[in-house]
Image (cartoon, rainbow, N blue to C red):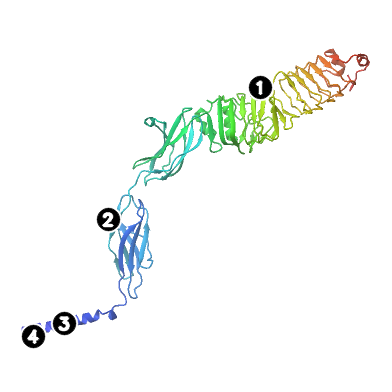
């Protein structure tokens, strides 16, 4: 066979093979199982530490979807694998976390069906860089004349560990002289921050700017303004002592607002010169306005260690606070317990709110001159500094420091037990409308002279007991009986009797027994009664 014949045979075979190959590629003769087709698409939701990887996987024929994952890494070798992902239709996505800020990552979709591994095209993305922290606006919390609490929130740490946070503090108009007040023992984490700013000047205008710093830089928030004064506002109970800081004993006058518990009241006592054990402190606070205070339950207060109660000035709250001279009680206080102000020897005035419905006196308030009551109070009233019931006919608390003479208002029909105990009035005049005297009504007072009205028949037990300056007593026209210890400890020199019948006197009514009474006291009786008095044989339970 020649060369031409050979070439013709080769061409024929080539055509024959080509025809057969074309016939084999027709749709009807495709294989049932084909490899999946994988595509990588752009990453989305890229932050400093996260990104969403996206891709697509398509299959043909009876091929099953392979097991899918993403390969990724900071180099084109992509030596890291994600966990398995599942296609939603043809779409495949996965949120990748724990990335490094400002870094380029390469990624591709990979599938494996047990026979072969298929990969998609490679793509890349770059995470956002770290930034300086982000802050919320600051809020003023508890504040006082020389200190304040502020609060703000670090909402984003910027992707870096924070190294410092606090506030820049400066007088308004002088930002160039700002000083830094930092949070001590800051843990470097984002979240809410509470900071005490101290050593402020009184009656000055300040601006506070919150700041936070990380390795990238510093962020300074919007300034808030604060004007210092002699007022304190508490945002949380138990915070007063922290707010005062090292200025605790520097105040003589204060106005306080906010909610106070036993811890705050105990701090206030220290500012007034006494702790809860009545030990002396350097405090010198003497004048305090609590109008806008709400008293909350919780915490012990005072030398009697009573627990603070809601809306109550409990027993011993201010006991022994000798520096206190004037107090305005909270507008919503309902109760003043017995001896709440015991032995406040410098206290001159107490202002009582409209809400007060239960008041008992305190002993030892030797300088107290006036108890004033809100005109809106439905339970009590004040007249000449004396605390009366709403009808004005009964004394609730007579101020011990009130001096001179005192004429009981004509509306009075009775005097309550211990109403004038330890008072400083030297002469009392009781109208005929007064019918009864309470036990111990004038006990231990400074009274020197008493004029009893015609309405009183009984001089009760201990009514003038311990009145060591009482020398003159004028009995009313209808006095019938003088009880035991009525004048015990009272050095009477003159007793005036105006009754038509001689009063009945119990044996221990006076400092001396009845039979020895006239050795020290002159008895003054109406003309014509002397002979009948001289004829009386003195004995136990005898009339005078």
Of labels 2 and 3, earlier in sequence is 3
Toward which corner of the image does residue 171 lie, by quadrant? top left
Location of mark 4 (residue): 5
Location of mark 1 (residue): 367
Of labels 3 and 1, earlier in sequence is 3
Query: Is 465 rendered above or below residue 29?
Result: above
- Horizontally, residue 15 falls left or right of residue 397, namely left
Q: Marks 4 and 2, Cα distance to the nearest angstrom?
A: 59 Å
Which is in the foreground here, disc 1 or disc 2? 1
Residue shown at 14% from the left, 84% from the top? 12
Location of mark 3 (residue): 15
Q: Marks 3 and 1, Cα distance to the nearest angstrom?
A: 131 Å
Of labels 1 and 2, earlier in sequence is 2
Which is in the foreground here, disc 2 or disc 3? 3
Q: Marks 1 and 4, Cα distance to the nearest angstrom?
A: 145 Å
Q: Marks 2 and 3, Cα distance to the nearest angstrom?
A: 49 Å
Of labels 4 and 3, earlier in sequence is 4
- Horizontally, residue 500 falls left or right of residue 386, namely right
Do residues under tags 2 and 3 come within 8 Å of each other at their CB atoms? no
Furthest-bottom residue in this view: 1
- Circle 4 packing at 10 Å, graded few (<14), some (14-19), many (20+), is few
- Circle 2 packing at 10 Å, graded few (<14), some (14-19), many (20+), is few
Percent across and percent down for residue 248 are 53, 28
Q: Secondary structure at mark 3?
A: helix
Location of mark 2 (residue): 75
**479 or 69: nearer the viewer:** 479
In this rendering, does residue 277 appear at all?
A: no
Which is in the foreground here, disc 1 or disc 4? 1
Percent across and percent down for residue 348 are 64, 23
């Amino acid at each position: 066979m020649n060369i031409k014949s050979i070439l013709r045979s080769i061409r024929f075979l080539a055509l024959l093979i080509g025809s057969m190959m074309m016939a084999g590629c027709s749709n009807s003769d495709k294989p049932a199982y084909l490899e999946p087709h994988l595509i990588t698409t752009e990453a989305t939701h890229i932050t400093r530490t996260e990104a969403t990887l996206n891709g697509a996987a398509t299959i043909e024929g009876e091929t099953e979807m392979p097991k899918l994952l993403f390969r990724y890494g900071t180099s084109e070798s992509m030596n890291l694998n994600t966990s398995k992902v599942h296609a939603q239709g043809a779409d495949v996505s996965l949120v990748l976390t724990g990335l490094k800020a400002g870094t380029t990552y390469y990624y591709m979709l990979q599938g494996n069906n047990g026979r072969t591994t298929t990969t998609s095209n490679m793509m890349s993305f770059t995470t956002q860089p770290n930034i300086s922290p982000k802050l919320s606006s600051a809020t003023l919390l508890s504040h006082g004349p020389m200190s304040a609490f502020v609060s703000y929130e670090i909402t984003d740490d910027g992707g870096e560990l924070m190294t410092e946070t606090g506030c820049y503090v400066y007088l308004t108009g002088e930002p160039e002289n700002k000083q830094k007040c930092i949070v001590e023992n800051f843990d470097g984490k984002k979240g809410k921050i509470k900071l005490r700013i101290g050593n402020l000047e009184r009656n000055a205008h300040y601006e506070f700017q919150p700041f936070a710093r990380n390795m990238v830089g510093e962020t300074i928030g919007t300034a808030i303004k604060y004007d210092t004064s002699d007022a304190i506002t508490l945002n949380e109970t138990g915070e007063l002592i922290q707010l005062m800081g090292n200025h605790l004993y520097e105040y003589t006058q204060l106005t306080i607002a906010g909610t106070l518990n036993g811890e705050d009241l105990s701090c206030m006592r220290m500012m007034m010169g006494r702790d809860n054990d009545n030990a002396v402190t350097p405090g010198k606070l003497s004048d305090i306005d609590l109008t806008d205070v709400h008293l909350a339950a919780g915490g012990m207060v005072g030398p009697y260690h009573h627990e603070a109660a809601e809306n109550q000035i409990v027993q011993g709250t201010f006991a022994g606070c000798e520096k206190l001279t004037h107090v305005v009680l909270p507008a919503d206080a309902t109760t003043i317990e017995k001896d709440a102000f015991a032995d406040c020897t410098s206290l001159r005035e107490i202002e009582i709110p409209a809400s007060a419905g239960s008041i008992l006196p305190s002993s030892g308030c030797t300088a107290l001159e006036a108890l004033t009551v809100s005109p809106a109070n439905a339970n009590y009233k004040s007249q000449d500094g004396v605390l009366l019931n709403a009808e004005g006919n009964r004394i609730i608390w007579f101020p011990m420091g009130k001096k001179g003479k005192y004429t009981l208002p004509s509306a009075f029909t009775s005097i309550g037990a211990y109403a004038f105990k330890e008072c400083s009035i030297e002469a009392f005049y009781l109208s005929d409308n007064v019918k009864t005297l309470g036990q111990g009504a004038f006990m231990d007072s400074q009274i020197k002279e008493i004029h009893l009205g015609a309405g009183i028949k009984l001089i009760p037990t201990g009514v003038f007991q311990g009145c060591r300056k009482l020398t003159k007593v004028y009995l009313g026209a209808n006095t019938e009986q003088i009880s035991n210890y009525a004048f015990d400890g009272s050095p009477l020199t003159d007793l005036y009797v105006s009754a038509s019948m001689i009063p009945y006197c119990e044996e221990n009514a006076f400092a001396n027994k009845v039979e020895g009474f006239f050795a020290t006291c002159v008895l003054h009786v109406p003309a014509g009664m002397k002979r009948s008095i001289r004829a009386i044989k003195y004995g136990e339970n005898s009339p005078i």
